[in-house]
Image (tube, rainbow, N blue to C red):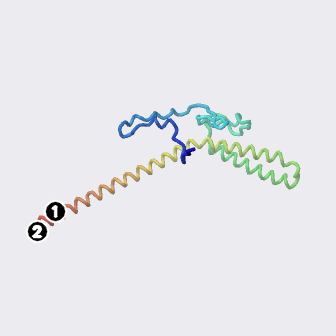
Amino acid sequence: MATATYPPPPPYYKLYKEYSQDPDSAPAPPPPIEGPYVLYGASYTTDDVLPGLEEQGVRQLYPKGTNIDFRKELRSLNRELQLHLLELADVLIERPSQYARRVEDISLIFKNLHHLLNSLRPHQARATLIHILELQIQRRKQAVEDIKRRREEAQRLVKEALGTLNGQ
């Protein structure tokens, strides 16, 4: 009985020919997945849409709509959170058995803060990408200037060498 150290390659290796002879010999990659799909029993989607708070069963504390002043709403929620934390400390001192409602209110404020911050993520990603691209442009301009400077220096050295050779 003969045994192999390694298993044979999968049969689809025959689809790939010699790349140097025919670059188009490999099969095309599969198209990207669009829309919902299931992976290991969990449903996922390729749409980058932030679900609303009410879709998640959470009451929204800031105004609805697309024209939201994020700074104002975040400050307002932050002040409200501070107030509720002070009320929680007061309730824990005077009526410890009634703390559950305050904790739920604080949890609701945190969820609203978290949702507001997550709605700013696309803007943050764009700003980060713009910053990275500007840095790349700056580095490339510096590299071009360095190459020009070195080229001019090399041309000067070549002229000096030619002058020295012609002077002999």
| Residue 144 position in % (x across, y down) | 34, 53
Q: From the viewer's perspective, is residue 150 above or below residue 67? A: below
Which dot marks residue 98? none
The residue positioned farthest toward the top in the image shown: 35
Q: Earlier in the sequence, mark 2 or mark 1?
A: 1
Q: What amino acid type should be assigned to the residue bearing mark 2?
A: Gln
Which dot marks residue 162? 1
Mark 1 is surrounded, within 10 Å at the Cα level, by few (under 14), some (14 to 19) or many (20 or more) other residues, namely few
Helix or strand or loop: what does disc 2 sit on?
loop
Q: What amino acid type should be assigned to the residue bearing mark 1?
A: Leu
Name the residue located 86 percent from the left edge and 55 percent from the top edge: 93
| Residue 145 position in % (x across, y down) | 33, 55
Does the rendering let one see residue 67?
yes
Name the residue located 52 percent from the left edge and 38 percent from the top edge: 10
- The quadrant of the rendering that contains the C terminus is bottom left
Q: From the viewer's perspective, is residue 163 above or below residue 110? A: below
| Residue 120 position in % (x across, y down) | 60, 43
Name the residue located 62 percent from the left edge and 41 percent from the top edge: 119
72 or 1, nearer to the observer: 1
Picture mark count:
2
Q: CA distance from mark 2 to mark 1?
A: 10 Å
**Residue bearing the label numbered 2:** 168
15 or 40, nearer to the observer: 15
Helix or strand or loop: what does disc 1 sit on?
helix
| Residue 14 position in % (x across, y down) | 46, 35
Residue 67 occupies which quadrant of the picture? top right
